[in-house]
Image (spheres, rainbow, N blue to C red):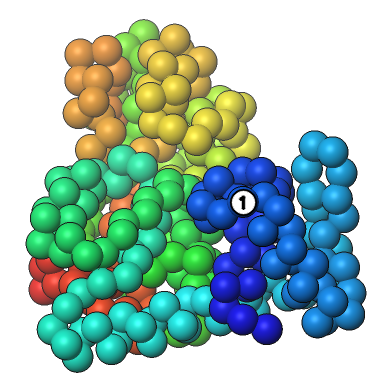
Amino acid sequence: MELRQLEHFVTVAEERHFTRAAELLRISQSGLSASIRSLELELGTSLFVRSTRRVELTAAGQALLADSVRTLASAAAARDAVAAVRGLVRGRLTIGAEPCLGSVDLPAELAAFRTANPGVEVRLRYSGSEELVDDVAGGRADVALVVDTGHTHAGVRLRRLSTQDMLVLCHPEHRFSAEDSIPLDELRAEPLVGFQEGWGAQALTRRAFAAAGFDYRAAMEVNDVHPLLDLVGYNLGVAVVPASFAAKRPDALRAVRLQGAPAWTVAVAVADQPSPAAAAFLTQLGPA
């Protein structure tokens, strides 16, 4: 079993399509198919169920996938460590981030990192904070910029970057708009516009509601800040969000202080033993 074969297998598993995987790997589709067949023969089992449109992992393929990802990550870390001894930062840096964290200008950070480390290939993926912490734990991401929701794994540490208050955003004609602040209990029966499960604002709000003795129920869920602001702007519900969100539409929406609101703490999640590229990115973000 060769690392090249595992890379081919993981790419097909992620793409669920041989043609797209071959394009990403920059090899012929016939060469990719031959590599997968050779791996299946060595293991004595099929790894994929093939169809004309897409492929799916077999039970054996699912069992192999997680270990393959970890093996490839370990091999990449070993290569990067050798490069670091030579005074070079090379390899790949996979970064995860929850959008609109409010304290990190990620495009600017990525531009600065690419300029300082031209030998590093940078990959970026946006998702919810809790899934991103899982990605760091599973070796699918080197670092992740997340909201600290208390969701952690052994082998992953969170370095806090900033903290801000959470508040309620509402339409100017909503009954909350005349108030300077409201208690958390006022949201007990209020229609909410929220984020999907695993995103920072949803996780923090759900926990705060549970501590106050009532359930979190969102009437509408989104996975991006702009649809959330649009829905609140049409008075379809209120949203519990970090204070920085209010600055996006200061004239259209009303920000109201929320008594008992959770803190929105932005952190960088990283493995206990980061790769040289990840360590360089952490250094760029500033001291712990």
Q: Is residue 88 visible?
A: yes
- What amino acid type should be assigned to the residue bearing mark 1? Ser
* Position in image of residue 60 (x %, y %): 84, 72
* Position in image of residue 157 (x %, y %): 36, 78
261 or 213, which is in the foreground? 261
Above or below, comparing residue 71 to residue 52 in the picture: below
Q: Which secondary structure lies at badge 1? A: loop
Q: Residue at x 51, y 52 (%)?
A: 26
Above or below, comparing residue 249 to residue 143 in the picture: above
Q: Residue at x 82, y 81 (%)?
A: 43
Above or below, comparing residue 285 to residue 287 in the picture: above
Mark 1 is surrounded, within 10 Å at the Cα level, by few (under 14), some (14 to 19) or many (20 or more) other residues, namely some
191 or 82, which is in the foreground? 82
Q: Which residue is mark 1?
A: 28
In the picture, the quarter occupied by the N terminus is: bottom right
* Position in image of residue 44 (x %, y %): 89, 80
* Position in image of residue 204 (x %, y %): 45, 53
Residue 94, located in which quarter of the rendered image? bottom left
In the picture, the quarter occupied by the C terminus is: bottom left
Q: Residue at x 35, y 27 (%)?
A: 169
Residue 59, located in which quarter of the rendered image? bottom right
Relative to residue 264, is residue 197 drawn left or right? right
288 or 11, which is in the foreground? 11
Q: Residue at x 20, y 20 (%)?
A: 250
Relative to residue 214, is residue 204 drawn left or right? left
